[in-house]
Amino acid sequence: KYPNVSSLGYDATSFGDFFVGIGPSVTFSLEEAEYNSSNHPYLNPKEGSETYFDIAAGYQFNKWNMFSALSFRNPKFVREGFDIKQTVKRTSLALEINKYLTDYSGFAPYIGLNLAYDKIEYVEEENEIILKSFDINQIEPGITIGWDIVPGKTSEALILRTNLRWFPRSSFEVGGEKFNFSQLEYNLIQVIFYPERFFKKRKI
């Protein structure tokens, strides 16, 4: 009953709805760390993280075609080679706001900005002996792009979402040298649930 191309808020009956979501993610380092280039050139220069869960809670402004969310992620990177082991754990909360561009037959792309508060734990070992270990906290700005699969527009209680978050300035220092990440987070499929919409349908 909807046009093939229209706004996601087309025919919206409520101003907005809360949502929660969860889905598997992986993070990639897009740059080679200067510290490793100088000290450990044999380690993989661009490492991917282990798989983790992206957990989100937010609010969708139906008639404005926007949503804001707070997302929790905790990627872990491990590099090993020639008895050296590097572990970087990142625990992060990102506040983001995104704008839907259009809705094409249930495919709704969006773009937005985010600001992440990161706690980074760095450990460097040689033959299981710790050489360096420290924690730092920092704030990282980023860009979010993604899309929703939402055939029923703002009446759907359960949708699928894909997120790509890029933090181009993500870095810290080890021994006075830059350890740059330029991280790209790829959340392939996130299941998003709108409880208000669900209970509204149950009443009908």
Image (cartoon, helix red, strand yellow):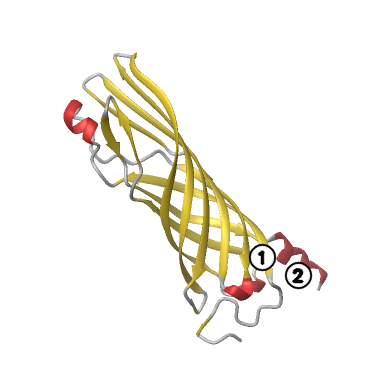
Residue appearing at x 51%, y 64% in the figure = 98
Q: What quarter of the picture does the C terminus occupy?
A: bottom right
Q: Which one is in front, 50 or 141?
A: 141
CB-based contact (under 8 Å), mark 1 and mark 2: yes
Q: What quarter of the picture does the N terminus occupy?
A: bottom right
Badge 1: residue crowd in 10 Å (few <14, some 14–19, many ≥20): many
Residue labelled with disc 2: 201
N-terminal label among 1 and 2: 1
Residue labelled with disc 1: 157
Q: Position of residue 124 (x, y in %)?
A: 32, 22
Whether residue 152 is visible, yes or no, is no
Q: Amino acid at mark 1?
A: Ala
Asked which secondary structure carries label 2, the reply is helix
Q: Position of residue 41 (x, y in %)?
A: 17, 30
**Residue 80, disc:** none
Residue 1 vs residue 148: left or right? right
Q: Quadrant of residue 80?
A: top left
Residue appearing at x 43%, y 41% in the figure = 51
Q: Which one is in front, 167 or 76?
A: 167
Image height check: is 185 above or below 87?
below
